[in-house]
Amino acid sequence: MQIFSREWFDALISKVQTDEVFQKKAVGFDSHLHFKVLKDHKGKLDNDVEFGLWVPDGKPSWYGNKSASEVDIFLEGKAGTYVEVFKGKKNVVMALTMGAVKLKKGSLTKLTGNLGAVNRFIEIVGTIA
């Protein structure tokens, strides 16, 4: 399954919606979380992809673009950077503070304050083939 494809996204949302650990860790996060993944040869992505979900339970979720005004947290980065973060090769907080992943909207404090949920989300992504 190709990372960032619709099939990959559907598998991700299915796991988020059934992962009790994530949902417990994400209590109080309560945000529409949106990712914009920029095309990148390193990440083997030929076109920009966008997707998002409501945290903690993944309902609603969407595959496609949303404007920043429609979401609470908007993250943007190259596909290769996201792949490194999702595989655990790059720390998400470092990626954010170094600007490899840009926080286009939202609060870094809210993300770091919910690091347990963020890290569990990354673990879930890593389980999808």
Image: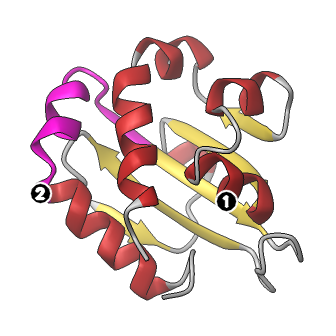
- Where is residue 76 drawn, in percent x and y? 72, 49
Amino acid of disc 1 = Val
Upstream in sequence: badge 2 or badge 1: 2
Q: What stretch of residues is rendered in magenta?
A: 18-32
Residue 5 appears left or right of 99: left
Q: Quadrant of the C terminus?
A: bottom left
SS class of the residue under badge 1?
helix
Estimate the x, y position of residue 1 in percent, counting from the top left: 48, 88
Q: Which residue does the numbered mark 1 point to in the structure image? A: 83
Q: Is residue 59 visible?
A: no
Instruction: Calculate the distance from the C-alpha at mark 2 to the C-alpha at mark 1.
Output: 23 Å
For the residues carrying marks 2 and 1, which lies nearer the camera in this image? 1
The answer to whether any part of residue 7 appears in the image is: yes
**Mark 2 falls on what kind of element?**
helix
* Residue carrying label 2: 18
Residue 83 coordinates in the image, percent (x, y): 67, 59
Q: Residue 106: which quarter of the image? A: top right
The answer to whether 112 is drawn above or below residue 39 in the figure is: above
